[in-house]
Amino acid sequence: MTPLLENSAESRGIVVRRRTIACLSIAVALLVSGCASGDDDDDAVDASDETTETTEGDTTDTTAAAEEVTGPAPGVTDDTIKIGVTYVDTASLTAVGLNFNLGDYQATYQALADDINAGGGINGRQLELVFATIDPTGPASADAACVKLTEDDDVFLVTGFFLNDAVLCPVDTHATAVVGGGMTPARLDAAKAPWITWMPDTDQPNQVLDA
């Protein structure tokens, strides 16, 4: 690849990552707004929710259906929000003869997160990034990264690089919110957590033709 093409590829990568982090900041703000503060007093269930049902002389005490908030979402503390970031392992591409300069993903994401944090973070919380590389030549590293981020690191959400159905590991199997990935009706139906993406979905071709 010529230096010009390498620079162009790196520039496109930075633009995509800036778009990613912008989408990420919006998603985090919306999701965290729906999280509990962790204050037991605020989360207490009012005793007035209890009701009594009577059927054929038998009296049964029941509690009205209401979800009891137990505290912040995974990866969220009073001061921080832990975000999992996946990105392409360029060394694995080089090993199979693909010399494609994608730039320094980790440094770019961290710089953008630092900028958000310098501006006060998200709802007063600082973004804490946890990174995992993905070898796109096989599914093993994507599965390992998913388990690491969702189980070991217990992140609030995962963003970055997802190859095809790999996005289902966090958003379906581990019920962890995702920003990014290719959204299809089938994948969206399987999602068990909030999912936002900056990538075009399967409706785009029809919308382009209609336009």
Image (cartoon, helix red, strand yellow):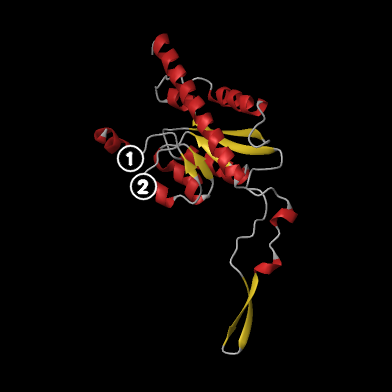
The residue positioned 48% from the left and 27% from the top of the image is: 19
Q: Amino acid at mark 2?
A: Pro
Q: Is residue 171 left or right of residue 72?
A: left
Looking at the figure, which quarter contains the C terminus?
top left
Q: Is residue 85 visible?
A: no
- In this rendering, the count of numbered labels is 2
**How many other residues sit within 10 Å of disc 1, few (<14), some (14-19) or many (≥20)?**
few
Tag 1 residue: 202
The residue positioned 53% from the left and 49% from the top of the image is: 174
Q: Is residue 31 visible?
A: yes
Q: Is residue 132 left or right of residue 8?
A: right
Q: Residue furthest front?
A: 48
Tag 2 residue: 185
Please provide percent x and percent y for residue 50.
66, 71
CA separation in Å, label 1 and label 2: 8 Å
**How many other residues sit within 10 Å of disc 2, few (<14), some (14-19) or many (≥20)?**
few
Mark 1–mark 2 contact, CB under 8 Å?
Answer: yes
Please provide percent x and percent y for residue 197.
45, 37
Please provide percent x and percent y for residue 93.
43, 25
Q: Amino acid at mark 1?
A: Thr
> Which quarter of the figure has residue 101?
top left
In the image, residue 54 sits, relative to residue 20, either above or below, namely below
Which residue is more in the foreground, 99 or 68?
68
Please provide percent x and percent y for residue 89.
49, 28
Q: Residue furthest right?
A: 41
Helix, strand or loop status at disc 1: loop
